[in-house]
Image: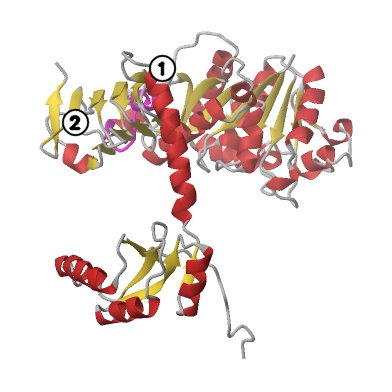
Amino acid sequence: MSDQSLELKGSLFPLSVLSCADLSVSSLSQQLRQKLAQAPAFFYQAPIILNLADVQQAPDFHAIKQLFTELKLVLVGVCGASSELKQQAQQAGLAALQLAKDSKTAVTASSNTRQTAVVTSTVNVPMDSKIIEQTVRSGQQVYAKGADLIVKGTVGAGAEVIADGNIHIYGTLRGKAIAGAGGDSTKRIFCYNLQAELVSIAGNYWLSDSLQGDFWGKPACIKLQDDQLVLAELA
Amino acid sequence: MAKIIVVTSGKGGVGKTTSSAAIGTGLALKGKKTVIIDFDIGLRNLDLIMGCERRVVYDFVNVINGEANLKQTLIKDKRIENLFILPASQTRDKDALTKEGVERVLNELAKDFDFILCDSPAGIEAGAMMALYFADEAVVVTNPEVSSVRDSDRILGMLASKSRRAEQGLDAIKEHLLLTRYNPERVEKGEMLSVEDVKEILSIDLLGVIPESQAVLNASNSGQPVILDKDSDAGQAYLDTVDRLLGEKVPFRFLTVEKKGLLKRIFGG
């Protein structure tokens, strides 16, 4: 017999967090029913965390719990609660969780301010570019954050070049090129010889199989048009 | 000051040790005082190829740990003046090498050798990284097939980013391509990548092309570096390679299928 019949381990799970300004049962019931009607199967018995960050007055936890059961949802716990609310939630049999987003929001806020600072100081200056003089070898990864990427050499098979801006490759592209990594769909990839494993613009990608054809082994420009990747001559 | 050359490839079985033995022997034949270090700790092979396996008393790890000095450990080649071997340990593993220890040994060797050849293990793990870390030049041994070429590309990336020269912002390691097991007949049939293909993919200077040859296996089995077999095509190709490594301009041989003459065709050859 194993003496390890019981095991407690920490794990991370994706949970839906419900934020709602008005937590009175009647209003919550109405709004939730509307929401669930849009995708009933998706939320069936879904574990939910109630965000209490913006809530001052203690809601009726027991009633909310019952409402969730009726709606085939599982209320697991609360987050962002003040100590008073937390206690009441715990008494109602709910777990009080740390709102991880608290720290994250703080970080984004500060990085936002930092970014703004950068932007104000670089007004009227075009997007920066990162220049790689040599060949990018297999296994190497180059990321031009918030910039265009220019590679003078070749991008080897198994190498990855990523840019938030455009990508220009003056050698052969044999590896992966990912332009508009920040989600900008107007960005393009230019290369002198297209033999890529993968090209991607703003999350839309093509594998080498779809690149075979007129432009394989030739100079090419890749752009996004109506959510479709389009290959064009470099002219 | 000695020149430290790493013989590396990423992929295993492409001919690193054979090439280390041949090039090291060739440099010694040219009057350069040369030591070949076997960095393949745990899979000691160089001593077999060099035919000195029965004379291994101490090894590289012993020297690093201070259990033996270099004088006790270096094996002097019996055939050629100026040639020494520093064997690997067969009982230890690659973690037995420390950067400080390797540096100390290399510095000590650099005092009285012209060339230090580091025979790298396969892979891109600690052992291979240790072999290339202190290099001034690199001989990247590649077979004319896609997986070997890709692994060489990976190692070239490592040479450019993980070496001492890269970390300290010194001049980059000088990279040489050594194409081994080259078979012009199979290249002509399109079964093998050509010299031009490999050069184009890796974009580094070509140091030598060693033809696929029966002489290599014979040499390995008899513990004679193939470069000493001067009648063989592989031996001659290695001699050319060593000349180029020393800066001489030598035309490339054995790149095309040898046209058999009428007599050869009749009598076989």
Between residues B221 and B101, which one lies in front from this camera angle? Answer: B101
Between residues A48 and B98, which one lies in front from this camera angle? Answer: A48
Residue A11 rendering spot, x and y as whole percentages? 50, 66
In which quadrant of the rendered view does residue B246 lie?
top right
Is residue B189 in the magenta section? Answer: yes
For disc 2, the neighbor class at 10 Å (few under 14, some 14 to 19, many from 20) is some
Residue A166 rendering spot, x and y as whole percentages? 28, 25
Under tag 2, what secondary structure? Answer: loop
Q: Is residue B192 left or right of residue B66?
A: left
The amino acid type found where label 2 is placed reads: Trp
Highlighted range, magenta: B188-202
Earlier-in-chain disc, 1 versus 2: 1
Q: Output the chain of dot 1.
A: A
- Which residue is identified by label 2? A216
Q: Is residue B64 left or right of residue A211?
A: right
Residue A2 rendering spot, x and y as whole percentages? 62, 87
For disc 1, the neighbor class at 10 Å (few under 14, some 14 to 19, many from 20) is few
Residue B208 rendering spot, x and y as whole percentages? 49, 22
Instruction: Tell me the number on the disc at residue A121.
Output: 1
Give me the residue at 48% from left, 74% from top: A88
Q: Is residue B95 left or right of residue A12?
A: right
Instruction: Tell me the number on the disc at residue B236.
Output: none
The amino acid type found where label 1 is placed reads: Ser
Q: Quarter holding the N terminus of chain B?
A: top right
Q: Quarter holding the C terminus of chain B?
A: top left
Give me the residue at 47% from left, 51% from top: A102
Between residues A112 and A129, which one lies in front from this camera angle? Answer: A112
Q: Are marks 1 and 2 in contact (CB under 8 Å)?
A: no
